[in-house]
Amino acid sequence: MKLDGKVAIVTGGAMGNGLGIVKVFLKYGADVVIIDYSDKLQQTLQELQNPKVMGYKADIRDKNMLIAVVNDVIAKKGKIDILVNNAGIAKLQPFATMQDDIRDAHFDINIKGTWNMTQAVVPYMIKNNYGKIINLSSVTGPMVADTGEVAYATTKAAILGFTKGLAMELVKNNINVNAIMPGYIMTPMVDGIAKDSNASNPQSVINGIAAGIPMGRLGTIEELGELAAFLASDEATYITGQGIVIDGASTLPETKSVGV
């Protein structure tokens, strides 16, 4: 299998896109380390029932905590081949009335957390002259945006820039750095957006989203996991500094209201 013998860290792997990535990585033979701040971590580990997965409850805003976790992973596993920076938040609020703490939470988790986690891992990848880093950006920010998404869009655009800059620095160390740019994937985050929309029927919000996607549905976490597994494998050795869109063609239509 294409990830046999590889050791991967996945942040935010207890649920949503992160869980999809964890499941697919395990399917392809990787040893997986989940780093998550959610209380759901232990439940996820119990449900997976796989000796090749282990977890740490840690806050990616705390760089010293992450360094301690990475050192422990190295002590137990001997190396880190793959890092997936998946952990993030999305809270929709109008820009004019957004509180500073909501803005700062997006910046601290989505940008600084990704920075902290990467900086803790990269020295070991450089030492081994090998690594695959996958950052979760989004189509939101680099390509599209909706009302209420200013903070989230800003951070996801920043992650794409982070990916490109880091790829240039690490290419000489045989380290590939790429970003995944999802459209709508059926995750707890999307479910939360639907529930926060004040609609009387949150499912109607999700149905409305699906209706605007040419494929007529939201993506699955496993589909996103398959893309991550490809980028984490040696099948993708000539790809670096790229943002790969996975969105069911939701960003493809030039004008949604025009039909033939």
Image (cartoon, rainbow, N blue to C red):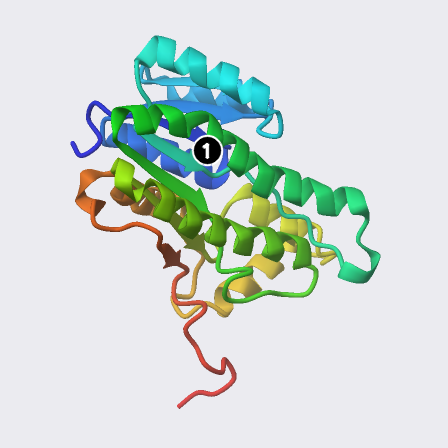
**Percent from the top left, x then y, of residue 10?**
42, 31
In the picture shown, does residue 13 fall above or below 71? below
**Percent from the top left, x then y, of residue 222?**
36, 43
In the picture shown, does residue 123 fall above or below 149? above
Task: Specify the quadrant that holds the C terminus.
Answer: bottom left
Position of 61 with respect to 170 (left or right) is right
In the picture shown, does residue 224 fall above or below 51? below
Q: Quadrant of residue 74?
A: top left
In this rendered view, identify the residue nearer to me: 177 or 169.
169
Q: Residue furthest bottom?
A: 260
Residue type (three-letter) at the residue carrying disc 1: Thr
Which residue is label 1 attached to? 118
**Percent from the top left, x then y, of residue 203?**
60, 55
Determine if residue 152 is in view.
Answer: yes
Determine if residue 224 is in view.
Answer: no
What's the residue at 40%, 48% (across, down)? Answer: 220
What's the residue at 44%, 87% (across, down)? Answer: 259
What's the residue at 74%, 55% (across, down)? Answer: 93
**Percent from the top left, x then y, of residue 6?**
25, 25
In the picture shown, does residue 109 fall above or below 78? below
Q: Quadrant of residue 25?
A: top left
Q: What element does badge 1 sit on?
A: helix
Task: Specify the quadrant that holds the N terminus.
Answer: top left
